[in-house]
Image (cartoon, rainbow, N blue to C red):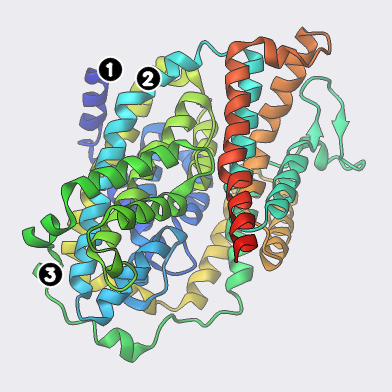
Amino acid sequence: MIGQVADGFLALANPGTFLHLVGGFLLGLAFGAIPGLTATLAIALLLPFTFGMEVKDALVMVASIYMAGIYAGSITGITLNIPGAPSGAITTLDGHALMKAGKGTQALGLSAFSSSIGGLIGVVVLIALAQPISALALLFQTPDKFSLVLLAVVTVTIVASGSLLKAMLAMAIGLMISTIGIDPMVPVGRFDFGSYHLIEGINLLPAVIGLFATCELIAQASMPTKVGKPEAVAKILRPKRRDFLPNWTLIREVGFFTYIKSAIIGVLIGMLPGGGASMASFIAYAEAKRSSRHPEKFGKGSYEGLAASESANNGMCGGAIIPLLTMGIPGDAVTAIIFGVLLIHGLVPGPALLGENFAIIAPMFAALFAAAIFVFLSVIAFGPIYLRLSQINRGLLYAFIGMISMVGVYASSFSFFQMWMALAIGVLASLLRIFSYPVVPALMGVILGPYLEEFLRRSLIVSEGDPTIFLRSPGSTVLLLLTLGFIWLLRIRPALRSKVQNASN
């Protein structure tokens, strides 16, 4: 395994592969830093173009977009109090407070340093755990696989922000979309309304483009073409590159234990299906505040709070890829799209992937590691430029994105119908967002729906319709108990505590 990982790093020495690494990293920075654009959208737009790439280059590029995009969400959050991506929301609390105090360059430098440390720790854990977990997953029987997918479906639903009922309905919509087309067990059409177009089902790419790109375009149509006031930006556009380097005293003030603890929290949250960078940064921030000697500074310009949230959200990257590669369960929205990249190239995520194709996947690990280092180097090279990203005219930008989205959908399927489906799903996703329904559960429903149905029906066929088969398997029983445990910890227990507190007040 060590030799294969080393070969993955050597693959980055290939000029073409290295250009894909750098290009993906720069794309991730731009999409992550511009409010309204995210790493998810960047990879969604890239997805159709991966058809013509070598699988190694495609995986390297999406990995570098992932790492850079998660970090870059903090850039405009710190400078303009407008996070470029949800992952930068918690960082914005202290980052912008430091910005107003005249310490913006220090905040940007510490953000990059913390993200780099968190990203490196996440990749090390990924390399260490990926194959052992894959070996364990190979022992899973069909009922175990159903319970695992059910765990993912339930977890993604209950960790979604806002109303649980709305998250459940969004997941149900995704699951329903996944059932359109030919029945996987019997060669008959389902829910096609007599249309020969719908008989082929709704492809993953139109669903991704619709739920993220088209939906975002519709949402941003009423927004101003520029973010922030020019005079507010002008005040922060005169730094020198060395000003972005965090000094040793500042790093020690935060404490190495804070970096490591926050990164580990990020990895663990990433391994939880549906966790995501936002949850990772929030939990790490709360833990850092709990254990801090100066909790009163949090939210008012705490370097420790900023470092904790940034270490966690980039540490999440490595953790989120573990369930994707080992069990075929995406950890967040970005890995859900990376799932599509793997499928495009004939690689099926799951227990056998690393055992049979580790040499193909290894450059992706190396790219994550290199991109984590690039994060810190980027703030030195591009620090002043970061501050100008918010002034891009988004009218032209979104027109270009809309064109690329539709061309990408057509190039992947040569079907005008799939283009219309991407538009229709985008309108549906926009309505969901208007009424505060989360979009990510819908995407995860589209991806996980076929697996949930397949493993459920196969298990019941084997047991001749006896549902106790899911309790007779030890692995399945453990996963079902774990599902109930997550429901208790993440929803029922907090609700009971809130009810008791309200009653006492």
* Residue found at x 73% / y 52%: 165
Mark 3 vs mark 2, CA separation in Å: 41 Å
| Residue 252 seen anywhere in this rendered image of the structure | yes
Q: Of callouts 3 and 2, which one flags the residue occurring earlier in the amino acid sequence?
A: 2
Q: Check if mark 3's residue and mark 2's residue have beta carbons within 8 Å.
A: no
Taking the view exactly as shown, the residue that stands out farthest to the bottom is 231
Q: Quadrant of residue 364?
A: top left
Q: Nearer the viewer, mark 2 or mark 1?
A: 2
In the drawing, does residue 61 fall left or right of residue 111?
Answer: right
Task: Kindly state the secondary structure of the residue where label 2 is placed.
Answer: helix
Q: Are marks 3 and 1 in contact (CB under 8 Å)?
A: no
Q: Position of residue 420 (x, y in %)?
A: 73, 55
Q: Which mark is residue 1?
A: 1
Q: From the top left corner, tell me how far across and down residue 110 is, in percent.
A: 20, 61
On screen, 444 above or below 283? above
Q: Is residue 385 above or below residue 211?
A: below
Residue lying at the far front of the rendered structure: 504
Residue 63 drawn at (x, y percent): 37, 42
Asked where in the image residue 92 lies, by quadrant, the reply is bottom left
Out of 487 and 424, give the one closest to the viewer. 487
Q: Amino acid at mark 2?
A: Gln
Residue named by callout 3 = 241
First of labels 3, 1 by sequence position: 1
How far is mark 3 from mark 1, CA to CA?
Answer: 40 Å
Of label 2 and label 1, which has the lower sequence position?
1
